[in-house]
Amino acid sequence: MKPMHLLVTLDEGYVYPLKVMLLSLFENNPDEEIKVWLVHAGISVSSLTSISRLVNRLGGTFEPCLIEDTFFDSAPVVERYPKEMYFRLLAGQILPEELERVLYIDPDTLIINPLTNLWEMDLQGYMFGAAVHKGITNLTTGINNIRLGTKHGYYNSGIMLIDLQQARQKIHLADIEYVIQESGHYLMLPDQDILNFLYGEDILEIPEEKWNYDTRKFKAYYARSLTKIDLHWVMENTHILHFCGRPKPWEKESDGRFVALYHHYEERLHRYNNKMDRGENNG
């Protein structure tokens, strides 16, 4: 069985939610061999060690990739946006050439069902697989079409299946730099806007309610599906919960519908860490 390759890109502030996400990933994908690639610009050694320790004990392998400042020598406007913004789009240039595809997942997520069907999905010749957050009326897509001059759905960059072979041929840092130089002041969500503006025609739409469920929009999913997509449906059929926006579920002021489930995995992580500290087997 070929391993599932997971890509995450983040800074030090998202190390904790990354661990919660990884625990949920491994616990709900027990039959998968998983390798985690963390692309970063300066996460501390202690944090990298703690992530590696967790992934190894969960049965996976961990590969951190430090991106040096010289990687962006030709990017005159890089200081305007976090470097991590580039990493998911430039995965083809960063990850080893022998990798054919990778699954990018934001750290502010929970994996509540297996990802095998997403990982093995036929991209039908497209470079990306990603979801569109439509709401009840899909008004957001129309607004973004006008703002960016696009004709397709506005894809969320938080969960993406990436064909790395195509990405190496089609995605170039110079193109991204040019968009930022020419239109940077119009970009509301820079990496997501760039994904849609430059590569939106090369994205296969995947069902958001299964693979990128926006936890803020329970009522929208419920109404749009004529009450089919209720909590029972989500727990049985949704694979990735995405905690978009603020507050985040690990923050005290958060009280959303799925926060209790997030706290469950936080408690699981706490117990897991305690067992690792005591050198016990986990379960």
Image (cartoon, rainbow, N blue to C red):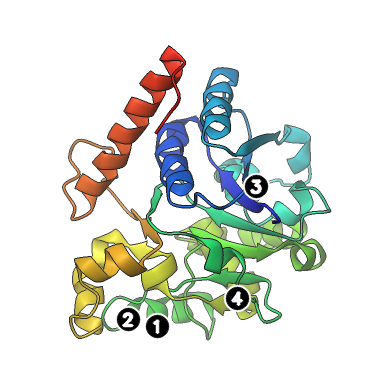
Residue depth check, mark 3 versus mark 2: number of the one nearer the observer: 2
Residue depth check, mark 3 versus mark 4: number of the one nearer the observer: 4
For the residues labelled 3 and 4, the Cα–Cα distance comes to: 27 Å
Give the answer, above or below, for where 230 lies relative to 276.
below
Q: Are the residues flagged by discs 1 and 2 in contact, CB closer than 8 Å?
A: yes
Amino acid under label 1? Gly
Q: Are the residues flagged by discs 3 and 1 in contact, CB closer than 8 Å?
A: no
Q: Are the residues flagged by discs 2 and 4 in contact, CB closer than 8 Å?
A: no
Amino acid under label 4? Ile
Q: Are the residues flagged by discs 3 and 4 in contact, CB closer than 8 Å?
A: no
Give the quadrant of residue 211: bottom left
Q: Nearer the viewer, residue 213 or 173?
A: 213
For the residues labelled 2 and 4, the Cα–Cα distance comes to: 20 Å
Give the residue number, with chain letter if any, for mark 1: 142
Residue 217 rendering spot, x and y as whole percentages: 25, 67
For the residues labelled 3 and 1, the Cα–Cα distance comes to: 29 Å
Q: Residue at x 28, y 45 (%)?
A: 262
Label 3: state its secondary structure. loop
Q: Is residue 20 visible?
A: yes
| Left or right for 64, reference 113 | right
For the residues labelled 3 and 2, the Cα–Cα distance comes to: 32 Å
Tag on residue 77? 3
Tag on residue 203? 4
Residue 182 rendering spot, x and y as whole percentages: 63, 63
Give the residue number, with chain letter if any, for mark 2: 139
Point out the image quarter for the C terminus: top left
Please tell me which of labels 3 and 2 falls first in the chain.
3
Q: Are the residues flagged by discs 3 and 2 in contact, CB closer than 8 Å?
A: no
